[in-house]
Amino acid sequence: MKNILIIRRDNIGDLVCTTPLIEGVKTAYPDANLYLLINKVSQDVVKNNPHLTKVFVYKKAKHKAKNETTLGVYFERLMIFLQLRKIKFDAAILANPVRCKYSLRLAKMAGVKNIIGADLGTSEIHHPFRAADFHGKHQVEHTFSYLSAITDHSIPIPPVKVFLTAEEQQQAQQRLHSLLPPVERVFAVHISSRSPKRRWPIERYAEIINRLVADPTTGVLIFWSPQGTLTPDDIGDQKRAEQLLAGCQNERVALYPTASVRELLAGFELCDRVLCSDGGQMHLAAALNKSMVVFFGDTDKESWHPWSGQYRILQTESGDCVDVTVDEVWQEIQALN
C-alpha cells in the first residue's frame, strides 16, 4: 500500500488510544504515506508524531470561534476534502471501534474506495468488523484490531505515545523553576472532569496536597481545564483551582495554567506522579508513561483504564467519586511508591 488514511473524529482520549494503531500501520507498511483525518479538538495529541505523513484537521461547527461563521467552517472543510481526493488512497480505516456513519461519510468524501470499519450493515464498508472481530476489552485493543484487515503479520500492540519537542520541554522546565523552589519530586493534581460523577471535592484535594507537601522534598503542581476547553462557552475550572491553592498555603504548591494540550503535556512530563479523573488528561498522562491514581466514576475501567504506565483506580459502587475518602486516595498514592 502506498497511501493509507486513518479517520478518528472523537475527543482527546480516543485519539490517544488510536496512537498504537497509527504506529502499527507504519510498522506493517514502513514505506507507505500515512495520513490522519481528525477534528480540531484533538489535534495537539498527534503533533510531531513521526509515523504520520500529514494530519488533516477539520472543525466541527459547534467548535467554531466567536468570530467564525458556520458557512466559513464548512468552506474550510470543503477545501480539506478537495486536497484529500487528490491523494488517491489505497485504504481508509474508520478507527472508531463502534459504528460511525459520519466517519464513513468522511471516507467517501475523501474518495476512498477500500474502507475498513465497524459493520454498518452496508456494502459501502468493504472490510466490516463485527463484534467478534474486535480483540480484547480495552479501547486500544479494539482499535488496534483494525490492523488485521491490512496485514497478516502479528504486530504487538505498542504503548500509547505523544511526542514533545525539546523547546516545549525547555519552556516547561523554565516555568517549573519560576513556580516552585528546588524539590526532589513533583506531583501533579488535575482537578477537572466533564462528568460531575468524576469530580472530587476541592477540600479533599487540599487535604491530599497538604499530606504530600508534609515531605519537604515534594512539590505539587495544580492543573485544570481552562475556559473553552470543551466548547467555546465552557467556563473552565480556574476558580476551583484558585480555591484549592488557597487551601494549601505552601510555597511548594503552585498553579500551572495551561492554554493548550501541548502545555498540559509538557507540564505533566515534569511530574513523577499524577492524581486525576478518568478522561483526556488521564490518557495524556498515560501517553507520557506516568504513574497515576485515577478517579473513575461510573466509567468501565476494563475498557478505559490507562494503557501505559503504572496506575491505581478509585471506583465506588455508586459510581460517584464523592464517595471516595481522603484516606482511600492516600492509600493508593502510597501504593505507587
Image (tube, grey):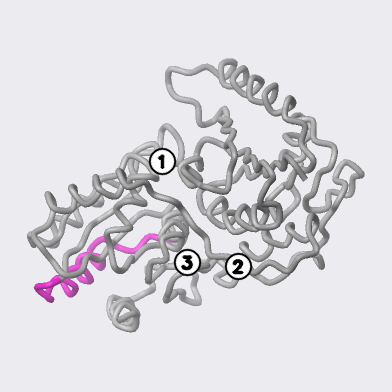
Q: Are marks 1 and 3 in contact (CB under 8 Å)?
A: no
Residue 222, percent across and down?
24, 56
Q: Which amino acid does label 2 sit on?
A: Ser
Of residues 136 and 326, which is closer to you in this image?
136
**Residue 297: image tag:** 3
> Is 326 drawn above or below residue 54 in the view shown?
below
Residue at x 13% of width, y 66% of height: 183
Total marks in image: 3
Q: Distance between the residues labelled 2 and 1?
A: 24 Å
* Local crowd size for mark 3, using a 10 Å CA cut-off: few (<14), some (14–19), many (≥20): many
Quadrant position of residue 123: top right
Q: Do the residues labelled 2 and 3 touch (CB within 8 Å)?
A: no
Disc 3, SS: loop
Q: Mark 1 points at which residue?
A: 229
Q: What residue type is labelled 1?
A: Thr
Residue at x 8% of width, y 62% of height: 250
Horizontal side, residue 278 vs residue 324: left or right: right
Disc 2, SS: helix
Residue 280, percent across and down?
46, 54
Q: Give the range drawn in magenta.
A: 198-217
Circle 1 or circle 3, nearest the eye: 1
- Give the prevailing secondary structure in the magenta stretch: helix
**Residue 199: image tag:** none
Question: Does label 2 or label 3 sit earlier along the sequence?
Answer: 3
> Is 165 drawn above or below residue 193 in the view shown?
above
Q: Mark 2 points at which residue?
A: 303
* Local crowd size for mark 1, using a 10 Å CA cut-off: few (<14), some (14–19), many (≥20): some
Quadrant position of residue 167: top left
Residue 19, percent across and down?
57, 54
